[in-house]
Amino acid sequence: MVPDQTVPAAQPSAEPLTEAVPARKYVENKPPRGLYVRVFIYVVATHVLLAMMSLVVIAANSR
């Protein structure tokens, strides 16, 4: 069950939010650089793992 105090608790917290929104005018449309670094690491690691697996398969087939 949801308590009835959630509605009054949301009203005081909404007042500081309206004051803080004009102070934070910085809007960035592109994702952070850390996302690109993470994706790059994942892509490189996946390629390395696939290359190692294919080398293991080639070595197993040659025996």
Image (tube, helix red, strand yellow):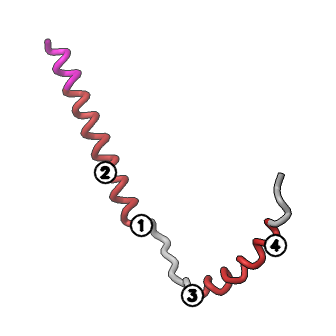
Q: Residue at x 61, y 87 (%)?
A: 22
Q: Provide the residue designation for mark 4.
A: 8
34 part of magenta stretch: no
Question: Where does the magenta region start and end?
Answer: 56-63
Q: Provide the residue designation for mark 1.
A: 32
Q: Residues within 10 Å of mark 1 (few under 14, many from 20)?
A: few
Q: Earlier in the sequence, mark 3 or mark 1?
A: 3
Q: Provide the residue designation for mark 2.
A: 41
Measured Cα–Cα span from mark 3 to mark 1? 21 Å
Depth check, mark 3 against mark 4: the one in front is 4
Depth check, mark 3 against mark 1: the one in front is 3
Q: Provide the residue designation for mark 3.
A: 23
- Residue 23 image offset from top left, x and y in percent: 57, 87
The answer to which image quadrant residue 61 occupies is: top left
Measured Cα–Cα span from mark 2 to mark 4? 46 Å
Please tell me which residue lies in front, 19 or 37: 19
Measured Cα–Cα span from mark 1 to mark 4? 36 Å
Pointer 1 and pointer 4: residues touching (CB < 8 Å)? no
Q: Earlier in the sequence, mark 2 or mark 4?
A: 4
Question: Is 27 left, or right, of 20 in this rendering?
Answer: left
Name the chief secondary structure element in magenta.
helix
Q: Residue at x 72, y 82 (%)?
A: 15
Judging from the image, what secondary structure is the residue with disc 2 in?
A: helix
Image vertical order of residue 28 relative to residue 56, above or below: below
Q: Earlier in the sequence, mark 1 or mark 4?
A: 4
Q: Residue at x 23, y 34 (%)?
A: 51
Question: Is 63 left, or right, of 49 in this rendering?
Answer: left
Q: Residues within 10 Å of mark 4 (few under 14, many from 20)?
A: few
**Residue located farthest toward the right when viewing the structure as drawn:** 4
Amino acid on which disc 1 is placed: Pro
Please tell me which residue lies in front, 14 or 42: 14
Measured Cα–Cα span from mark 3 to mark 2? 36 Å
